[in-house]
Amino acid sequence: MKTILNVVGASLLMLTACSTPKSADEAFIRENIENAVAQHTIQTDIIEQSGKILNPRTIKDGKIVYVPLEDWCSGFFPGNMWLTYELTGDKKWLPLAEKYTEDLDSVKYLKWHHDVGFMIGCSYLNGYRFAEKEEYKDVIVEAAKSLSTRFRPGAGVIQSWDADKGWQGTRGWMCPVIIDNMMNLELLFEATNLTGDSTFYNIAVKHADTTLKHQFRDDNSSYHVIDYNPQTGEVRHKHTAQGYAHESAWARGQAWGLYGYTVCYRYTKDKKYLDMAQNIYNFIFNNKNLPEDLVPYWDYDAPNIPNEPRDVSSAACTASALYELNGYLPNNGYKKVADEIMVNLSSPAYRAEVGTNGNFILMHSVGSIPHNAEIDVPLNYADYYFLEALMRKRNIENNNCFSTNCLTQK
């Protein structure tokens, strides 16, 4: 398989060099789809041969790490199946996407952390969008209800973590809110679209507004963790958990913010969210420590730059967000930057050879260096946002369209 793909890849590179820019884009997209199909074929063959439903998240000591359904990353691999189905149109991927997604059904009742937006959004919501799975509506709405139980009206935020459990219980927090939570608001917005119940929408907007007020520094970088008094809304601490230091700019946190506020603009058309997305963009791409290839170090203030690990997951998420942001502001160069990121991520420096890397697409991501976890490894969410960005690029190139529908439909 590897030999065949190398020949295909070489042919596509020759085509790219000798073709019009439009043909070059088509060849780039096609070659990346073929690469993803090859990796996912190996990955799903392993799963199917096991007779179990396994959910790959990363690798450790050269072995694939599978996670339980309550893991915050459990929705990304099913999401990758939906994106592969959407990118290829090959019905081979549909039953796999359905099976891996529907294994997560009980997540809709999960109330002890905020990540149901990732878990159900990437799986069930994509199934609803790409395959018109009407039966998925109830799961999406129930998950939004579960997420809403974490809303603290006195503070105007959705509490991210329980403050009395695990390592979080050692920090002295009362109501910790992390910038990652911006990624979960899409589930609430969609629940309002599906039900007509504005409660979900209002919670999402209030959380976005409170986060905008307290989570960002004057330079438009974000803190990772803001700890609130849940009754009064007083800010008790401004901290990090996965970044280098409390006052540093954790790379993936900046990507979460950019993506999250772009999504908020999609649903509300409130210009302040669009402005915030642009401000975060300016912080990222004017940062003196951003490498020339636009794949950031795991923290923009990490002490040993340039000898620090890169975080491909941040770059992939940023690229996907920029394709959407370009749809709202098409004359600001956002697509050009996203295209550059995607070309770099598709190079041998970051994209693994087929059959290697635990059969994940991208190498060199970082989970949490302070926790000594997932350092310089593949991560299923890096692949997810890479494939989402590829889908968005394809839709824009094919349709010459910048509406929201281009983000999720052919």
Image: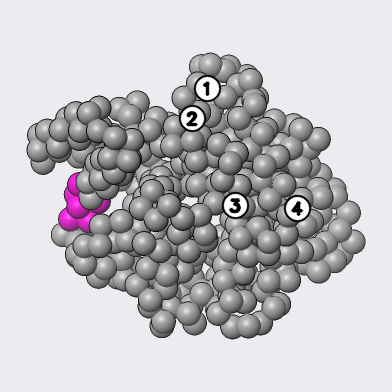
Residue 23 versus residue 70 in the image, above or below: above
Instruction: Give the mark nearer the N terminus: 3 vs 4.
Output: 4
Q: Disc 2, disc 3: CB below 8 Å?
A: no
Point out which mark residue 291 bears.
1
Name the residue beneath numbered marker 4.
272
Picture quadrant where residue 195 is located: bottom right
Residue 286 versus residue 150 in the image, above or below: above
Q: Secondary structure at mark 3?
A: helix
Inspect the image, locate mark 3, and give the three-letter code of the amino acid beneath it: Tyr
Whether residue 369 appears in this view of the structure is no
Name the residue beneath numbered marker 3.
328
Left or right of 173? Residue 309 is left
Q: CA distance from mark 3 to mark 1?
A: 27 Å
Q: Disc 4, disc 1: CB below 8 Å?
A: no
Q: Residues within 10 Å of mark 1 (few under 14, many from 20)?
A: some
Q: CA distance from mark 2 to mark 1?
A: 6 Å
Point out which mark residue 295 bears.
2
Q: CA distance from mark 2 to mark 3?
A: 24 Å
Left or right of 260? Residue 27 is left
Q: Secondary structure at mark 4?
A: helix
Q: Which residues are magenta?
A: 38-46
Instruction: Give the mark nearer the N terminus: 4 vs 1.
Output: 4
Q: Residues within 10 Å of mark 4 (few under 14, many from 20)?
A: some
Q: Residue at x 34, y 72 (%)?
A: 131
- The residue mark sitting in front, 2 or 3, is 3
Q: CA distance from mark 4 to mark 2?
A: 27 Å
- The residue mark sitting in front, 4 or 2, is 4
Would you say residue 23 sits in the magenta stretch?
no
